[in-house]
Image (tube, rainbow, N blue to C red):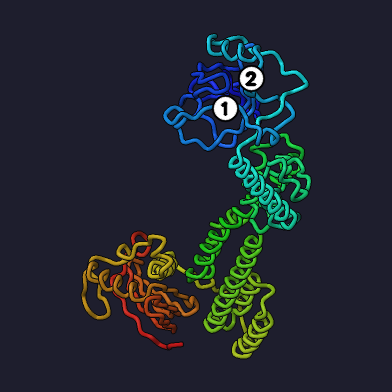
Amino acid sequence: MAIEDRSSGLYLTQGGKWTKQPNYFDIEAINTTSARLGPEIVDHVEADTILALHAAGAGAFGILVWPAIRPSAGASSGYVIAEPTASNEAGITGEIPSVAAGASAATEAAVAAALAEPLPPPPPPISETRPSFAAPTPAAKGLSLRYALLIANGIAVLIIAMFLFRGTEAAKGLVCEPTGALHGVSFAHALVSCPEVAEVDPEQTAYNDYLQCLPGKEACAQIICGDSYLSGFTNGAHSVQVKAARMESQKSCQAEEQKKIAAVDFSAFSECMRITINVCNRSQCVDRYRYKLTVEPYASSLRQAAATSANDCRYLQEESAFADFNRCVAAAACDTARCASAFTSAFPGSAHVSQVLQTAENAARTCATEHPIVQQPAPPTPAPQISSAEQATRTFIDRIYYASSSQGEADGASLSSIYAPEVNFYGSQKSNAEIMKEKIAYNQRWDTRRFYLRNDSISVACNSSGQVCRAVGQVEYDFYSSARGKRSRGMSSFDFLIANSQSNPKVISESSKVEQRY
């Protein structure tokens, strides 16, 4: 006998599986209307399942609703398949007639054949006129009704919930969002209508990311934004614009880097100008950084600083020449024309020119009054000449104060090479090493030191051989201690004795005195 699940059209097989192919079980017949079923059947059929019973070669011969049987109870307690009674026959009618007592000889023969034959071929299709169903038991009928009510109530609740939930934002999140629980479920679109999602263009997305990357970034960082786009889309739809913008960013980046380097160089140039005592020597700072500071605004600042230093230097030279003119007039009142010519030829546009000419004219009148008769003009008195020893001594004085300044120290100028092995140092005889110890301690106390020589105050006198020269004069100083935050400014006088001024000058005596504090 084959057992068919009417709801699915599948047949029970050995081992409890259901297939489309009929499988015929060997059953124990009790009589012509009843049979005993074993656990191979009862253990695999759920309660309330509507089953059709097939005999080999005879088709379906009965339908029943499977009762709630405990597993294997059919084999041990003798549950049987019996003919439907007259009391329940009317409950299930229509398709397949039930097997009743006194069934036809053909039906009995079919049952007998089902018991004897193992696995016959599939049965022929069931005719359009089907026999009536076997009527279910009252208990099975009640269970089916309860299940139907439960299912109907569940469906009703689900419909109401869907109606209330339909079109809400929560529904959109569940159905339309890619991460939603109902995203991609076909029936879920009954809850909400999701907007059409445009196809994403990866190139356009990369270009949008590039545009968002640019704002607020310096030119060098904008190059990275362009590289990020071009790494994926070298020949993309927007690659021409991105490449052009990247080139401009690269130019701006190079200009920014040059400005940063120039800023460092300009800081060094400013420090060089600040610590160079002699303004006429500041041209060396200008020459050192002229070709480094070519980027604006530093190039203009260097030119302005160079012009200022040149003007200051010319002013000092002019004042020194005017002092020389006054000394010349005092020494040779009757030769003022020569003194005036030396000044006016060097500084024709000086503010002192009118004063020089007036002084020369007055001196000439005085000379004519005091010497009215001149038999023969005296040969012109040569202008006082500065000996090479004196000039070398003046240069050495500049070297002393340059080496003593913080700029000289930074440039590696040697102080010890300025002094002789033994020196009369402020009235005491000291060795070079002792002097260096004092100098180093003093320089550490004042880490920034600047000196401004008053060249017009410097006087140099040398012995006849020029081997020993004495230099006296005045120097302005400006000291600052970064550790203590203190500053000291003023003017002092100095007195040096210098040996071998023309070959290997050395200080053999030194003294100084503070004349004024600012």
Please indicate whether residue 327 sits to the left or right of residue 170 in the image. Answer: left
Kind of residue at badge 2: Gly
Q: Secondary structure at mark 2?
A: loop
- Residue 79 in percent (x, y) is at 49, 30
Front in this rendered view, residue 306 or 178:
178
Residue behind mark 1: 82
Q: Alpha-carbon neighbours of circle 2 within 10 Å: few (<14), some, or many (≥20)? A: few
Q: Is residue 264 left or right of residue 247?
A: left
- The Cα–Cα distance between marks 2 and 1, rounded to whole angstroms, is 13 Å
Q: Quadrant of residue 137?
A: top right
The answer to which quarter of the image holds residue 447 is bottom left
Considering only order in the chain, which callout, 1 or 2, is on the residue closer to the N terminus?
A: 1
Residue 258 higher or lower than 58, as above or below: below
- Rendered position, 310 above or below 8: below
The amino acid type, in three-letter code, at marker 1 is Ala
Question: Which label sits on residue 102?
Answer: 2
